[in-house]
Structure formats: C-alpha cells, structure tokens
Image: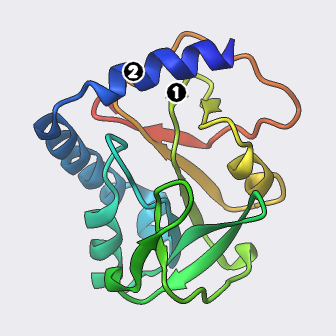
Amino acid sequence: MKTIIRKEVLAKRNGLCDEHVSISSAVIKDSLFRHADFIDAQFVMFYVSKGKEVATHAMIASALAIGKRVCVPVMRDKLIIAAEISSFNDIGSKDSFGVQVPSEVKEVEKSAIDLVVVPLVAYDSSNNRIGYGLGAYDRFLCDYRGKKLGLAYGMQRVERIEVDDRDIPLDYVITTES
C-alpha cells in the first residue's frame, strides 16, 4: 500500500509548477520560523530539498543567519550521518540520490540536535509519514529524543498510512494549511 501511495503522491507533487513550490515554501518557512519548537531550538537538522519537495535552501540560509547551528543529512551505507555546516556554501556536490551534501563532513551527535526537519512524500492526521522507501530517516530517528517535524504541501496528506514498529511518527507536520 505504501508503494501505491508513494507513487500517486509523488506524481501529484512532481506536477506542481515552480511558482506554487516557491510560494508554498515561503509560507511554510514563515510558519516554521514562528513555531515555538523552532524558536527554542539552538541546533536544527534540515533536509536539503530537491525537485518539487518543500524548498529548504532559504530556510537553511535564514536559520544560519539568525545564529542557529545547522546540520544536514549525509548518507553512508544506508545510514544518515548529521553533518554540521556553517554556511549554505558548504553544500555543493550531489550524492548518488541527487541530494546536495557538504563537501566536508563535520559529523555531530544526534543527541546535540534539538529539532530534525524530515522530508516526506505523504503524511496522515496521526503524523505518520511515507518517505522514499529506504527507511533511512526511521533508522536515524528511532533513538532520537528531540522534536521531529515534517514539511509538506496540503495535497500530500492522505487518509491513513499503515505503519509497523519500524515507522517513526513525526511530532507535527507544517503545511500551507497549518
């Protein structure tokens, strides 16, 4: 069932026009930056957006500009490593998934991270998520004790996602409608 939902939602999301992505991402950024958990967080992990995902590049640059410590994910052997950056310019080359990663990996312990901004393909009203199918974020988040937040367009919400004991729900999802 997850495979079907993933395929359908990705097809819809990939059909969004660039203007919609840009405007929606700006609205979501504004909501994120006004959220109490973001305001309180000193160290934030952002996914680096690609394609028609909610755009995080401006979020990363703005978080750094207001003095937050920021890290981004780097994949190693199907595991996520948190790599701290001091500037968006630290991010350059693309990994095998087409995601921009830092040229130098300054690994940080996940226990130091206050808030993780997680990519998603689909989510439901219980804040369960469907990702890209690798389980990398679920493995990263399984022993993470900070806040877990998703960013999504409203059209990514589905009625219900079947979960198992490996699926880690988010604390909340910020959308253009939230």
What amino acid does circle 2 point to?
Answer: Ala
The answer to which image quadrant residue 124 occupies is top right
How many marks can you see? 2
Query: How busy is the neighbourhood of tag 1: few (under 14 within 10 Å), some, or many (20 plus)?
Result: many
Q: Quadrant of the C terminus?
A: top left
Look at mark 2 in the image and give the residue it sits on.
Answer: 11
The quarter of the image holding the N terminus is top right
Coloring applied to the structure: rainbow
Of circles 2 and 1, which is in front? 2
- Helix, strand or loop at label 2? It is helix
Q: Residue at x 60, y 37 (%)?
A: 131
Q: Earlier in the sequence, mark 2 or mark 1?
A: 2
* Residue position marked by numbered label 1 in the rendering: 122
Name the residue at the right extreme: 165
At x 54% / y 89%, what residue is drawn?
104
Q: Residue at x 60, y 86 (%)?
A: 105
Q: Is residue 18 left or right of residue 13?
A: left
Q: Amino acid at mark 1?
A: Ala
Eyeballing the image, is 121 above or below 81?
Answer: above
Q: Which mark is residue 165?
A: none
Residue 66 is at least partly visible in this image? no
Position above or below: 38 against 21: below
Instruction: Rate crowding at label 2 as few (under 14), some (14 to 19) or many (20 or more) other CA atoms within 10 Å.
Output: few
Please tell me whether residue 51 is drawn above or below residue 3 in the rendered image: below
x and y percent of residue 66 in the render? 30, 82
Answer left or right for 127 relative to 38: right
Residue that extends furthest to the front in the rendered view of this protein: 96
Q: Quadrant of residue 141?
A: bottom right
Q: Position of residue 27 (x, y in %)?
A: 21, 45
